[in-house]
Image (tube, rainbow, N blue to C red):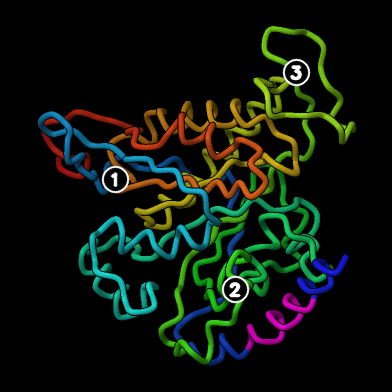
Amino acid sequence: MWKNLALAAIAKETETTSPTIASSLPHLDPANSEELDLKTLPPLDASKCPGFKLANGPGSTYGTTARVFNQDSFDAAITMPSSVLSIPPTNSGKPTQAVETQIFEHLESATASGCGVEYGIRTQPRGGWLKGTSAQEEALCFRSTLAASLHRNLYPIQDRTGLYTRDVVVFRESMSDGHKLMIPGTAMTDLPIVSALTVAGIRRPDVKPIGEEAAATGNDTTVETKGPFVFADPAARDLTKDKMRLCLRMAGAKGHTMLVLGAIGCGAFGNPPEEVAKCWMEVLSEVEFAGGWFKEIWFAVYDRTNEGNFEIFTEAFDGKVVGELQAFKPPTES
């Protein structure tokens, strides 16, 4: 209870501070988000693929290296550009706007900031953050201007729809660091800026053990999904993969070349982590996303309670290449 009250106070302070942050950075639009739908968002155009070449690949081999980290999406998105591009960090360890300019020069026309996916509640903007709830969506809202862009008129989020927020200003440290305000110690112009994709995970889908017919009801909150469970309903699996395609398509369409993904629907929503990891691998292996659309993809799987999700995704993805394509010329060349 006391934890919820403390988080609710942090949420209220974040809510009142966000407009001040926004007004101090007039070149950004942190209160704006765009609704994108899988049905109307065209598949990625291979001729526009950046074609990132694999450092250790044979000949002209293009693709994306995946990494897995036990941290929240914003921490991953903040550190990703300087880490991936080997740009020395600032004294604060955060990529400032000056560093982002350097990153932009490295990537030329590609979008410089890291882009993170957050999995929210379909019907409720910002989840229960003002009440101190601490699931993934709320945890990111506590730290940033994200909540200001999740307007009520955009909800409920439809099954195959997502929200794209280009400018998210992060001005608090993570929960593990006590949500300390980064201002005034950090100048407004030096605050980290990331982009966010908001997609609603499936809430409590029916699951069943692999190889067994009996399904566990999704209404039973006592169901354990740590073991080798799968979706009981094939439609839920198909929907999960569509949500994943939407994430990749939104990021690629908006020009992001560094992407932070996660264990969509795992944890509080009870999706089976082994099956979710398998779905991600299947989608990332599809032709549409091959050839190096992203320099790197990081999976931020924050496993505070040691549920095993981090280990599952580490085994599935860490250090592996996805979307590998061998060609004589990069996909962007004719």
Q: Quadrant of the N terminus?
A: bottom right
Marks 2 and 3 sit apart, C-alpha to C-alpha, by 37 Å
Left or right of 248 in this view: 304 = right
Residue at (61% x, 46% y) in the render: 303
Tag 1 residue: 49
Q: Quadrant of residue 254?
A: bottom left
**35 lies above or below 244:** below
**284 lies above or below 195:** above
**Nearer the N terminus, badge 3 or badge 1?**
1
From the top left corner, tell me how far across and down residue 93 is, in percent.
37, 72
Secondary structure state at the residue bearing disc 3: strand
Residue 208 disc label: 3
Q: Nearer the viewer, mark 2 or mark 1?
A: 2
- Residue in the foreground of this view, choosing between 165 and 174: 174
Tag 2 residue: 144
Left or right of 286 in this view: 174 = right
Q: How many residues crowd around disc 2 within 10 Å: few (fewer than 14), some, or many (20 or more)?
A: many
From the top left corner, tell me how far across and down residue 25 is, in percent.
48, 87
Left or right of 42 in this view: 108 = left
Overall secondary structure of the magenta section: helix
Q: Nearer the viewer, mark 3 or mark 1?
A: 3
Secondary structure state at the residue bearing disc 1: loop
Q: Is residue 14 magenta?
A: yes
Amino acid beneath label 1? Cys
Residue at (59% x, 31% y) in the render: 276
- Residue in the foreground of this view, choosing between 77 and 51: 77
- Range of the magenta residues? 9-19
Amino acid beneath label 3? Lys
